[in-house]
Image (tube, rainbow, N blue to C red):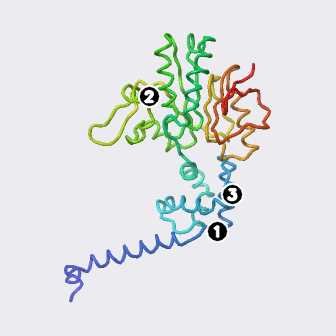
Amino acid sequence: MSKENRVAAGGAPHLDKEALNKSMEKTMSLFRAEMGDGEFKRFSELIQSEFGIKMPPTKKVLLQSRFQKRLRALGMHSYKEYCDYVFSEQGREQERSHLVDVVTTNTTHFFREPKHWEIMNTMVLPELWQRGVGRVKPLRLWSAGCSSGEEPYTLAMVLSEFAVRSQGFDFAILATDISREILQKAMRAVYSIEKADEIPQNMKKKYLLKSKTKPLIKIDGGLRAKVSFQQLNFMEDFRIQEPQDIIFCRNVVIYFDRDTQVVLFNKFCNHIKPGGYLFIGHSESLSGMRLPIRQIAPTVFQKIG
């Protein structure tokens, strides 16, 4: 049979199948491969120095599995090849932003840690309002480590409801995160409908738009306008232009070592107005840190001055 007849008779699909099999073999070899101790050491030191995130040896398998998507996207077949690329000049320019998306954890939901919202409504906001905060100038609030946006949008709902009860009250929310990818998701403000389960019914009706064709919700435009997003790396020498009345930094520093936590919380205190408030996660602690704050409730602190 001639070459032409073989192709016509089905030779080309056979070649395509061969190529597919080779591609699958390469992919499977990646899953069977392991990251060497040398590569893991380089990655863990880089991740801690640039992003502040601890990466002990127990995290090696986790890091290895998270990197697989990037290796596939780049057409690489070993962790050494990827490591060499990350530390190359080209990799420093093009891959570091992807690296942070891979290693950061973005677990969050609306109205997370309900006790905090109770304290906001019954203690913090009434006290600030009594002092005149939010009347002449907007109350300024920073969601530090905002992830995909559920926290700052929850804050916007809570503050909007307080504004209904307090004529003339105004506010502005700054939301920051290290990951560009997760910030883009936060700015889109589109979530699966299941995400709305934690939102009180009256707020669902006021602040959510429901898709007519898909199981999705979107945050109302008026609420979105109260939140501005910005990329920020806590490990850099950052400075927020306006001092804040309230900072939420919850379940972020648990991934940092103690020395980094002390430095970071001192930075936060420098950005809070005297009498302002700091909220942290229930798995975090400021015990033993010398900070200009006093505890007013579990995981809630007020700046002294």
Front-most of residues 87 and 70? 70
Q: Amino acid at mark 3?
A: Pro
Tell me: residue 80, above or below residue 302: below
Residue count near mark 2 (Cα–Cα under 10 Å), binned few <14, some 14–19, many ≥20: many
Residue drawn at (47%, 72%), measured in percent from left and top?
28
Q: Amino acid at mark 1?
A: Gly
Q: CA distance from mark 3 to mark 2?
A: 38 Å
Residue drawn at (39%, 42%), measured in percent from left and top?
192
Q: Quadrant of the N terminus?
A: bottom left
| Residue position for label 3 | 56
| Residue position for label 1 | 36
Residue drawn at (55%, 17%), measured in percent from left and top?
138
User: Badges 1 and 2: C-beta atoms under 8 Å apart?
Assistant: no
Front-most of residues 140 and 98? 140
Front-most of residues 215 and 24? 215
Residue count near mark 3 (Cα–Cα under 10 Å), binned few <14, some 14–19, many ≥20: few
| Residue position for label 2 | 224
Quadrant for residue 247, please give it.
Answer: top right
Tell me: residue 159, above or below residue 197: above
Position of residue 249 measured from the top left corner of the image (x, y, whole percent): 62, 35
Quadrant for residue 233, please give it.
Answer: top right
Q: Quadrant of the C terminus?
A: top right
User: Badges 3 and 1: C-beta atoms under 8 Å apart?
Assistant: no
In the image, is 291 to the left or to the right of 79?
right
Q: Amino acid at mark 2?
A: Arg
| Secondary element at tag 3 | loop
